[in-house]
Image (cartoon, rainbow, N blue to C red):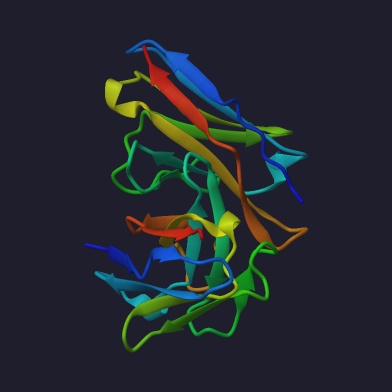
Amino acid sequence: SYVLTQPPSVSVAPGKTAKITCGGDNVGVKSMHWYQQQPGQAPVLIIYYDSDRPSGIPERFSGTNSGNTATLTISRVEAGDEADYYCQVWDTGSAHPVFGGGTKLTVL
Amino acid sequence: EVQLVESGGGLVLPGRSLRLSCAASGFNFDDFAMHWVRQAPGKGLEWVSGINWNSNTIYHADSVKGRFTISRDNAKKSLSLQMNNLRAEDTALYYCAKDRLRYFDWSFDYWGQGTLVTVSS
C-alpha cells in the first residue's frame, strides 16, 4: 500500500518559518491534504488540494506538492501552532485514504 | 455551526461487538459523504470506513473489512459503525468525519471529538 513519510518532529522559533515535509512515490500527482491536531483535540483540515485553505485558516499556512515531496509551510510561527500535523492523500491502488505518520511541531 | 457528536464507545471484551453513532447537525447531512477515522492511543490517524451520501458506495479499510459495517440514516442525520469480533488492536479514539463532497473527495473538513473504544479482557 502507499506510504507517506513525515519527519517525527520539527522545531522552530517563534516568528520564524516552519516547513513540514511529506514524502511519497510520485506524490505530486496526487491531491494532498493537511491536518492540524492540537493536544487533546480533534484534527482540523488546514490545507486541501495541495494548497487551498478552508475558510478561517490563516494565510500563514500554505502548501506545495511536486515530485516526491509535499510541503506544509507555516510562516511567522506562533506558540499556538504547536501541534501534530498530518498529511493525507487518496491512494488509487487501494482505493483508500492514507495518512502520514504525523509530525510534532515544537515552538521553541 | 457544523457539529458531529460521537457516542457508543466503551470497554469491551475481545470478540464482542459494539455500535458507534454520530449525530450530525448544522449542515445538510444527506449532501455529503461521511467517514470514520480512528487514532490508537499515542499513535497517528487511520481511516476506517467511508459512505457516500445515499449509501450506494461504501469502503472499509482492509484491517476492518468483514468485521465493521458503516451505515447512515439521512432522515435522522446519523452515521453508525457496527463493530463485530473486536480485537485489542481496534482500541482507539474513533472520530466521525465529514467529507468535503457528496461523493468521495477524500478530505475531511469537520471532525467530532471522538468516542473511545477499549478492547481488553
Position of B56 with respect to B77 (left or right) is right
Position of B3 with respect to B62 (left or right) is left
Q: How many marks?
A: 0
- Residue displayed at 37% across by 10% down: A13
- Is residue B30 positioned above or below A18 on the image? below
- Residue displayed at 55% across by 69% down: B50
- Is residue B39 positioned above or below A77 on the image? below
Closer to us: B95 or A85: B95
Closer to us: B17 or B69: B17
- Residue displayed at 71% across by 45% down: A29
Q: Position of residue A20 (x, y in %)?
A: 54, 26
- Is residue B29 positioned above or below A107 on the image? below
Q: Position of residue B118 (x, y in %)?
A: 45, 58
Q: Quadrant of residue B19?
A: bottom left
Closer to us: A24 or A73: A24
Closer to us: B66 or A95: B66
Q: Quadrant of residue A108?
A: top left
Position of A19 with respect to A76 (left or right) is right
